[in-house]
Amino acid sequence: MLLDRAGNIQAEEWKHLANDEPAQDADSVTVSLKRWQAERARLKGRNARTGLRLPNDAQVETLAADIGDFPMIVLDFPKFTDGRAYSQARILRSRLGYKGELRAGGNVLRDQLLFMKRCGFDSFEVDGERAAAENWAAAFGEFDLAYQAPTGNGAAIPRRRLGSG
């Protein structure tokens, strides 16, 4: 199931390609970092959107020159105890100025959705069925105050205390 930042179920518009799977020119596809590095020129010349899937150990700073080429980047959460994709998201948004869709994939848990959103994620690949969508969507509204400043607009508790947000 795919959720947006508001917790709404979205239709999937992207196809995640395996490294050996051909990319059709009409499809919006995501490719691995390894494939992007190997086929960069050909993938840039496609007539359809090409997104990027990053493993959580990739150094996102190395993408600075290509960052505008990706309408979507999927960051991987291989297990819930590994938070490196949170750091990748913050770097992409804050340091590299990435404006495209940032998606959380892999082991995305309901309890982490709000934190992912605050780090700059726009969409979330979650396990579940439509019947569980309300429960997932409720995660976004469970807390309205936080100590960490969000990526983008919004204020954290310290700023509110100072009267600047």
Image: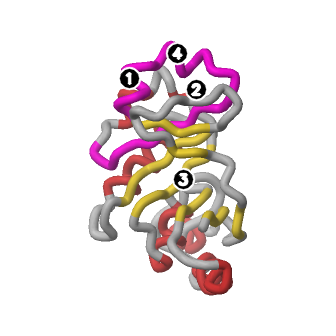
Q: Position of residue 111 (x, y in %)?
A: 46, 79
Mark 3: give few (<14), some (14-19) or many (20+) Cα within 10 Å. Answer: many
Per the rendering, the mark at residue 42 is: 4
Residue indicated by mark 2? 69
112 to 118, vertically: above or below: below
The reply to whether callout 3 and callout 4 are in contact (CB within 8 Å) is no
Residue indicated by mark 1? 37
Mark 2: give few (<14), some (14-19) or many (20+) Cα within 10 Å. Answer: some
- Tag in front: 1 or 4: 4
Is label 3 in a helix, a strand or a loop?
A: strand
Residue indicated by mark 3? 103
Magenta residues span 33-57
Q: Quadrant of residue 99?
A: top right
Looking at the rendered structure, the kind of residue marked 3 is Arg
Compute the Cα span from label 1 to label 4: 11 Å
Is label 1 in a helix, a strand or a loop?
A: helix
Compute the Cα span from label 2 to label 3: 16 Å
Mark 4: give few (<14), some (14-19) or many (20+) Cα within 10 Å. Answer: few
Relative placement, left or right, of 23 versus 92 is: right
Q: Earlier in the sequence, mark 2 or mark 4?
A: 4
Q: Earlier in the sequence, mark 1 or mark 4?
A: 1
Instruction: Say whether residue 45 is magenta.
Output: yes
Per the rendering, the mark at residue 162 is: none
Q: Nearer the viewer, residue 118 or 136?
A: 136
Q: Earlier in the sequence, mark 3 or mark 4?
A: 4
